[in-house]
Every structure is written in structure tokens, then in C-alpha cells.
Image: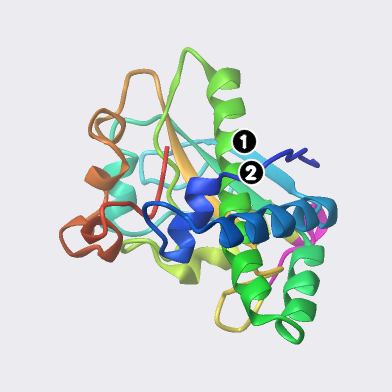
Amino acid sequence: MEVRLDRISRPEALRYLGLRGAVPGDVDEDLDRCEALLLRTIRPRVTWRRFDLLPDGTLSGTAFRPEGESIRVLLRGCTGAILMAATLGAEADLLLHRTQGKNLLDAALLDALCNAAIEDVCDALCADLAREFAPAFLTPRFSPGYGDFPLSQQPLFAAVLDLPRQLGITLTESWLMTPQKSVTALMGVSDTAPASQQGGGCTACSFSDRCLYRKKGTGCARS
């Protein structure tokens, strides 16, 4: 399913650039120019599926049992789970590759904007899912590679969501996604507000006490 993206979160892009406070006017103008170029180029797409959670933690109708203490805490009290994936498409990768050979500053700005854009796409999908499944509650999304949710489970995401056919996403031998500006994530579905939602996404992560993002005052996952 294609997603229309009309703007990219500037605060999020600045966070990826490591910039805080007032932004110099020339940098702001360069970001405007790169954002306009990126929005003309990318083709954001998403896919998702909902599953019942079996007593052993396996997703119904699959052989996928999400691993890790972070996921166990995230899904505590949940009766279902949603697997989701989003991508900016191969067009984003191609644009970044071309720009890296011409203008390193633009390449850095575009990379930050791409990271912000894929988060915006995921946020929009999560908002749509929250409305679709209301009055049920959804936990914050959590991606393989965060906390102790192993990246080695990416092939299961790819198989269950049929990512090559649905979104054109393939995996490298080290389980990284191509196109690079792509995200997979899991959310829990509960009839009552789950503990992870009551306290925020970081409370569900067993790595929260040694998270580099939290030390910077941010986080690696958002609801």
C-alpha cells in the first residue's frame, strides 16, 4: 500500500543530524531544498498483518515466536500482535548514492531526512492502526535489533509479511534490509492498556538502563 507523505518532521531530521537549538539560516534553506527533492523522489509503502497470540507466544498460523525479554514484557497481557513494515523504496537509496558522489553535505542532509521520513511513515501507519483497532489498545512499536529483540528474526518478518513481493524488501546475509530506508516492527494488541503503554515504550526494554538514546534525552522507539 502506497502512503502519501507531504512533509518530513524537521525536529526529527535535526535530531538525526545531532543539531539542537537555533539552526543557521543556510542549513535551514538547504534542508528545505533537500526535503523538496526527497518528497518528489521517494515512494513510501507499508504493509501489516494482525495475529492472535498463542499461549506459548507464537503468532497464530505461523512459526514466528518473537524472542527476547523486551518483547516478552511488551506483549504482557496482550491477546494479539501486529507485524508491520514500511519502506521509502529503492528510489531513496539511489538518490543517496548519487548525491554521495557529488555533494557530501547534501548527502548528510538527505540521509537525516530519509531517517525522519521513514519514522513519519511508521507514525502515520501506527495512527491508522490505532484508529482501526479501537477500542483495543496498541503497544509502542518495537523493531528487531532494538534491545534484546534479535535482528536474526528479520527473515521471519520477511516471510510472514511476504516483504519481497509486498514492498520489494530483501535481506542481506547479515539480515539488513534493502532498500536501506526500511523498517519492520511489532506491536501488541490488548483489550486493556498494557503496562508498556502506561509507562511508555522505554519501560518495556531491558536495555533502557544502558541506552545511548535515553542518555541523549531521546529514545529509539516511539508509540
Residue 31 shows in the view: yes
Q: How is the image coloured?
A: rainbow
Quick one: label 1, few (<14), some, or many (20+) residues within 10 Å?
Answer: many
- Check disc 1 and report the residue beneath it: 125
Q: Quadrant of the N terminus?
A: top right
Q: Going by the picture, which residue comes out furthest to the front?
A: 25
- Check disc 2 and report the residue beneath it: 121
Q: CA distance from mark 2 to mark 1?
A: 6 Å
> Residue 215, relative to residue 129: is it above or below?
below
Instruction: Name the residue: 31% across, 31% down.
Output: 197
Give, as a single range, the part of the protein colored magenta: 164-170
Q: Is residue 125 magenta?
A: no
In percent of width and height, residue 4 lies at 77, 38
In percent of width and height, residue 5 lies at 73, 40
Mark 2: which secondary structure? helix
In percent of width and height, residue 48 lies at 65, 41
Type of amino acid under label 1: Leu
> Residue 173, relative to residue 196: is it above or below?
below
The total number of labels drawn is 2
Q: Mark 2 and 1 residues: CB-CB less than 8 Å, in contact? A: yes
Quick one: label 2, few (<14), some, or many (20+) residues within 10 Å?
Answer: many
Mark 1: which secondary structure? helix
Residue situated in front as seen by the camera: 145 or 42: 42
Q: Is residue 136 left or right of residue 40?
A: left
Residue 61 shows in the view: no
Q: Is residue 95 left or right of residue 27?
A: right
Q: Quadrant of residue 38?
A: bottom right
> Residue 16, relative to residue 44: is it above or below?
below
Q: Quadrant of the C terminus?
A: top left
